[in-house]
Image: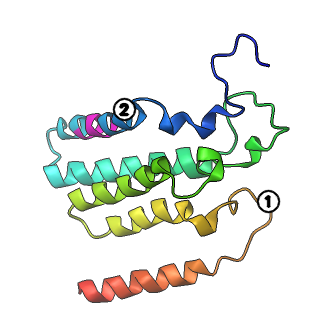
Amino acid sequence: MNVGVAHSEVNPNTRVMNSRGMWLTYALGVGLLHIVLLSIPFFSVPVAWTLTNIIHNLGMYVFLHAVKGTPFETPDQGKARLLTHWEQLDYGVQFTSSRKFFTISPIILYRWTQYLYLFFNVVLRIEPSAPCMQGKCSSTEPQPQPQELYLIYVIITIMKTVK
């Protein structure tokens, strides 16, 4: 029993994205970032959207897929310190509402941008979120990843159809 602790979760990272108002706060944060970029005089609207998308995707990649562990002291015998935030989200259950939201959000931002090279940025943000990547970032040994070849094939195919 955790006396004096504000949460009842073993690992608060698992439910933080489902907390009340989190999605609204997330959307308002992205909107605020875009407004700040629009306030810079020499940025046009497409450039501001592009920078919004790039900054968002880099930030979310670092926050969700690069940083391992938890800022909380958890009684899970150190299991959480080997997992990224994405792997801890909803206790690792795939296709939950919060995972769907954070998978769709960069796609929606991409639709508002007007530059093709952002496709690669979105792919780099969504690819680590795929169910086949679950647990790959936690391993200390490099793992073979055949989906990278398929991803390259998809990118080349899309680039051929765009021309």
Q: Is the magenta stretch mostly helix, strand or loop?
A: helix
Segment colored magenta? 29-34
Residue at horizontal 30%, vertical 47%? 52
Residue 55's disc is: none
Query: What x and y, as percent, mark residue 135?
Result: 70, 60
Horizontally, is 72 left or right of 21 in the view?
A: right
Looking at the picture, which amino acid does disc 1 mark? Answer: Thr
User: Residue 42: image x %, image y %?
Assistant: 15, 44
Q: Is residue 115 above or below residue 149?
A: above
Q: Which residue is drawn at 51% across and 52% down?
A: 96
| Cβ atoms at labels 1 and 2 below 8 Å apart | no
Location of residue 23 (image quadrant) = top left
Please give the label number shown on residue 140: 1
Q: Quadrant of the C terminus?
A: bottom left
Question: Residue 89's spot in the image, x, y percent?
Answer: 59, 46
Q: Where is 71 relative to 4, above or below? A: below
Mark 2 burial class by Cα count in 10 Å: few <14, some 14-19, many 20+: few
**Residue named by callout 2:** 25
* Mark 2: secondary structure: helix
